[in-house]
Image (spheres, grey):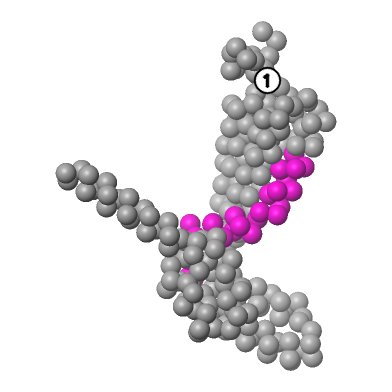
């Protein structure tokens, strides 16, 4: 009985977390201008920000918008490069001071989506010119380079003040995903995008060294 209750409690806890995560706190609708909330929505939608964190970010974004108005007015309708840098710094500082490291990664992964999709498509095209690929192999190549691009961009933003750590984490991401690709498809790709088939897949043996 105790085991059942423990499992039930765990299940309810997971359900509660799942319903709270990636949900916009609609109570903010009556407190802030729609322009502020529209900027806040992607952060709430793509991270596990709590209601308290969302309220803190809404206030920081409101202050940023006020500063934007001041700078545009001062510049007669034009933002200088320094003005744009100041606003970008305000946004970045707000995110870093309110969100946890994992939440920042969640949001930076979201921001990296367009580049990640493009990298996956480019990789499929490049490898297809060198090897005849099956449908699943194309998916493996696409997914590998999608993850590499998304995760690399995210850690670079997270570790902006520590380029050495950013490079090391990016290297680990690349090596991990390339190893996954080779294990799944038997295809090895180097950093110059030269592809070779080192393992041949058959219906009878999932993995066989090529040429045997």
Q: Quadrant of residue 135?
A: top right
Horizontal and vertical percent position of residue 182:
63, 27
State left or right for residue 164 relative to residue 31.
Answer: right
Q: Classify residue 68 by image quadrant.
A: bottom right
Indicate whether residue 150 is drawn in magenta. no
Q: Does 196 sit above or below residue 87?
A: above
Residue at position x 67%, y 17% from top? 200
Q: Residue furthest top?
A: 212
Query: Residue, x 64% and y 15% (percent of image)?
Result: 202
Q: Nearer the viewer, residue 152 or 17?
A: 17
Residue located beneath label 1 in the image: 198
Q: Quadrant of residue 138?
A: top right
Q: Viewed as shown, does residue 24 lie left or right of 4?
A: right
Q: Is residue 156 visible?
A: no
Residue found at the far left of this picture: 1
The x and y percentages for residue 194 are 76, 31
Rendering coords of residue 110 (x, y %): 61, 57
Q: Position of residue 34 (x, y in %)?
A: 60, 80
Residues rendered magenta in the picture: 96-123
Against 162, is 210 above or below?
Answer: above
Q: Residue at x 57, y 41 (%)?
A: 172
């Amino acid at each position: 009985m105790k085991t059942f209750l423990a499992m039930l409690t765990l299940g309810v806890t997971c359900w509660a977390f799942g319903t709270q995560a990636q949900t916009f706190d609609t109570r903010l609708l009556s407190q802030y201008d729609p322009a502020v909330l529209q900027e806040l929505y992607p952060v709430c939608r793509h991270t596990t920000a709590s209601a308290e964190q969302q309220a803190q970010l809404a206030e920081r974004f409101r202050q940023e918008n006020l500063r934007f108005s001041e700078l545009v007015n001062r510049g007669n309708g034009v933002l200088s490069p320094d003005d744009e840098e100041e606003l970008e710094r305000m946004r970045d500082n707000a995110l870093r001071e309110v969100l946890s490291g994992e939440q920042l990664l969640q949001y930076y992964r979201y921001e990296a989506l367009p580049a990640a999709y493009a990298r996956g498509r480019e990789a499929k095209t490049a490898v297809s010119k060198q090897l005849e690929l099956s449908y699943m192999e194309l998916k493996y190549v696409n997914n590998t380079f999608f993850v590499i691009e998304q995760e690399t961009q995210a850690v670079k933003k997270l570790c902006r003040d520590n380029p050495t750590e950013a490079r090391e984490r990016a290297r680990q991401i690349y090596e991990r995903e390339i190893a996954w690709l080779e294990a799944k498809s038997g295809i090895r790709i180097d950093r110059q995008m030269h592809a070779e088939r080192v393992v041949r897949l058959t219906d009878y043996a999932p993995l066989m060294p090529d040429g045997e």
